[in-house]
Image (spheres, grey):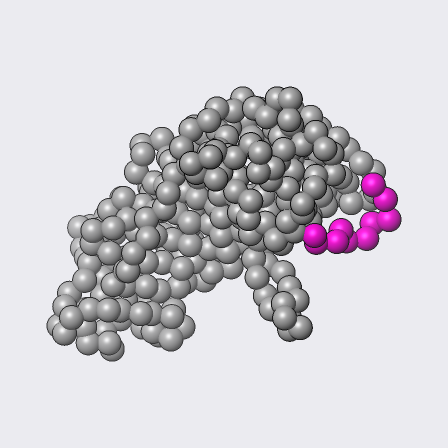
Amino acid sequence: MPKTGAAPIIRGIVSEPSDPNNVIEIVHSNPSALKKIVALFNSYSADEMVWCFRPTAITISAQDLDRKVNISCEIKVDLLVQYYCSPDYLGSATGEMTRCVQTKSFNEMLKHVDKGCDLIRMYLTMQDNSSLFYVIVNKQGIEKCYERKITVNTRPAARTIAGEYPLQFALDSKLLKQTIGEISKVAGSFQIRKEEPDDNPLSFEFVNETQESTAIDFRDARAIALRANLAPNEHFSVVVRVAYIKHFATSCIGDRVYVRADRKQPLCLMSFVDGRDVQSGGAMTHDHVFCIRVEIEV
């Protein structure tokens, strides 16, 4: 590998791996982003992360210790430096390969990543595709290699819930962190409330230490991209446990958090990580490598 310090070329999905012995090969130029994502999984005390490999996508999913929160990360593989997925090792019925790794072990492994690291390589081998190895390259051109066998098992990958939500909005991640931090000082839960007509604000309502009802209002509907599909004079509210949302809120993993709320479906929070400009059809567009989704039981 040339040690010029130049940014690696983004090849995305490739038809052949760098090493013919590899059945899965992932190369990414921002190890710190992956480190933050795995740290989020670890903060929810998820025992295991399920890595689901498909020819055109990777999904990482897990549940928290109480089985109340689903965490998933969709990786847009065409934005990776390189991604190879051998069709010969995919399930005939599912068209995918799933491998389960210990969250704590994977998180410990990524502690080797620091600001000087600019490349991470992970792969599964033909002879023993129950092993995941990784290589980290230092920015200064000094190649530091770490190899570690990870215990993996085949198990179904979690599927996220899809459907229409009557209430959708978006908050800057720092504002969400501040809001949840303020609520967590005095309450273990809060209500997301919205009432028709449209000029009524979106509110996070909770009971403070003196048992008084307190509300944090978001009055600028345009600033939070508020969309409410409610009946005339409808009063919408859903209760959220602070413990279930706090890890995501305090991580500030993305610049903005997109929230979907319903009385019957899990509360869905979504954020995008590792943005970059991409040339598509002769024009430059902005896209993200990682999409993080957290679904919380309500």
Q: Identify which residue, 271 or 215, lies in the foreground.
A: 271
Horizontal side, residue 65 vs residue 126: left or right: left
Q: Reply above or below: 245 against 122.
A: below
Evaluate whether residue 186 shows in this view. Answer: no
Task: Name the residue rendered at 82%, 44% in the picture.
Answer: 140
The location of residue 131, given as percent across then percent down, is 60, 24
Task: Name the residue rendered at 31%, 45% in the picture.
Answer: 296
The location of residue 72, given as percent across then percent down, is 44, 44
Horizontal side, residue 212 vs residue 26: left or right: left
Q: Identify which residue, 10 or 186, lies in the foreground.
A: 10
Overall secondary structure of the magenta stretch?
loop
Does the magenta run of residues contain 281?
no
Quadrant into which the N terminus falls: top right
Evaluate whether residue 88 shows in this view. Answer: yes
Does the magenta run of residues contain 9?
yes
Task: Name the residue rendered at 70%, 54% in the picture.
Answer: 10
The location of residue 283, given as percent across then percent down, is 64, 73
Q: Reply above or below: 204 against 92.
A: below
Task: Name the residue rendered at 62%, 54% in the picture.
Answer: 79
Q: Reply above or below: 123 against 252.
A: above
Q: Which residues are magenta?
A: 1-11
The location of residue 248, given as percent across then percent down, is 42, 47
Q: Reply above or below: 214 against 30.
A: below
Q: Identify which residue, 167 or 126, lies in the foreground.
A: 126
Horizontal side, residue 244 vs residue 50: left or right: left
Q: Identify which residue, 82 or 119, lies in the foreground.
A: 82
